[in-house]
Image (cartoon, helix red, strand yellow):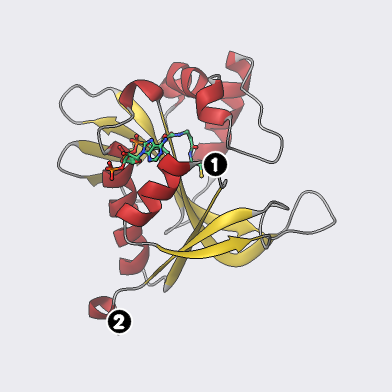
């Protein structure tokens, strides 16, 4: 999984030493309220340690879970994710679909600075440069900030879908720009 620098941000793999940030991020209701069918906050530091273990275990060359931080201070501000999206279905855990999703979770102290947009855009560029032709994002209908990020990075709104996660979500799709086509 490659690392990236943008104008203001760095994106790199998670490290064990990021555990306090991960706990601070995912123990907040304002971060978790639109995530998952039954949203819940992280309740212990041990859960944060397990999460980091999971996030660092993937060795996929294109997909990834990036820790995002500010280049000026080094402080972490959030995460961008590129991975297979689970298909809706009757059997749990849900099986991955053939589609790839992009997602983002940022710390409330960092919201409103365009950080999610800036970090997601570089991951989307990476996805297309790596040969993916389509990337989707699914967003809870009430999550207007996240839908705005989708639009700002050039994803097209395709209405609602219940194809993924056993949920009804707003579907956004990015397709490989023609200039990158083979
Ligand atoms: C969604 C999220 C990542 C956005 O982070 P951010 O760094 O503030 O995003 P940006 O600053 O890049 O852009 C936010 C955009 O949403 C807009 N926005 C913010 N709150 C909004 C709201 N309540 N309604 C409509 N638009 C809103 C902002 O104005 C901005 O758009 P603009 O640049 O055109 O003005 C952040 O709110 C978050 O982490 N939420 C919790 C986790 C989550 O829900 N993740 C998405 C799951 S699908």
Q: Which residue is pictured at 38% across the width and 62% down the height?
A: 155
Q: In which quadrant of the rendered image does the C terminus lie? A: bottom left
Q: Is residue 26 visible?
A: no
Q: Horizontally, is 72 left or right of 131 in the view?
A: left
Can you say whether 30 is above or below 122 in the image? above
User: Residue 95: percent from the left, percent from the top?
Assistant: 72, 58
Label 1: which secondary element: loop
Q: Residue 166 versus residue 98: which sits nearer the camera? A: 166
- All told, the count of numbered labels is 2
Instruction: Specify whether tag 1 is near ligand 1 (CB below 8 Å).
Output: no
Residue at mark 2 to residue at mark 1: CA–CA distance:
35 Å
Residue that protrudes farthest toward the bottom in the picture: 182
Q: Residue furthest right?
A: 90
Q: Residues within 10 Å of mark 1 (few under 14, many from 20)?
A: few
Q: Residue at x 59, y 60 (%)?
A: 160
Which numbered disc, 2 or 1, marks the residue closer to the eye?
1
**Label 1: which residue?**
142
Checking the image for residue 181, the label placed there is 2
Viewer can see residue 10: yes
68 versus 4 height, above or below: above
Residue 2 numbered tag: none
Quarter, ligand 1: top left
The quarter holding residue 164 reads bottom right
**Percent position (x, y) of residue 63?**
46, 55
Residue 121 percent location from the top left of the image: 29, 53
Would residue 111 be found to the left or right of residue 104 on screen? left
In the depicted view, which residue is nearer to us: 137 or 96? Answer: 137
Of the two numbered discs 2 and 1 on the same chain, state the one appearing first in sequence: 1
Disc 2 crowd, CA 10 A, few/some/many (<14, 14-19, 20+): few
């Amino acid at each position: 999984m490659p690392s990236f620098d943008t104008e203001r941000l760095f994106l790199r793999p998670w490290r064990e030493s990021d555990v306090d940030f991960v706990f601070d991020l995912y123990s907040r209701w304002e971060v978790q309220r639109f995530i998952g069918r039954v949203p819940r906050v992280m309740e212990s530091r041990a859960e944060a340690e397990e999460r980091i273990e999971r996030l660092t275990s993937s060795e996929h060359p294109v997909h990834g879970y990036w820790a995002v931080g500010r280049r000026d201070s080094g402080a972490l501000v959030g995460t961008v994710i590129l991975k297979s999206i689970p298909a809706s279905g009757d059997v749990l855990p849900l099986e991955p679909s053939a589609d790839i999703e992009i997602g983002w979770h940022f710390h409330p102290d960092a919201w409103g600075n365009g950080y999610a947009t800036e970090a997601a855009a570089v991951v989307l560029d990476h996805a297309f440069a790596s040969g993916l032709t389509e990337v989707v994002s699914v967003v809870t209908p009430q999550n207007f900030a996240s839908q705005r990020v989708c639009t700002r990075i050039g994803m097209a709104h395709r209405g609602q879908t219940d194809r993924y996660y056993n949920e009804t979500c707003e579907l956004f799709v990015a397709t490989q720009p023609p200039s990158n086509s083979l």
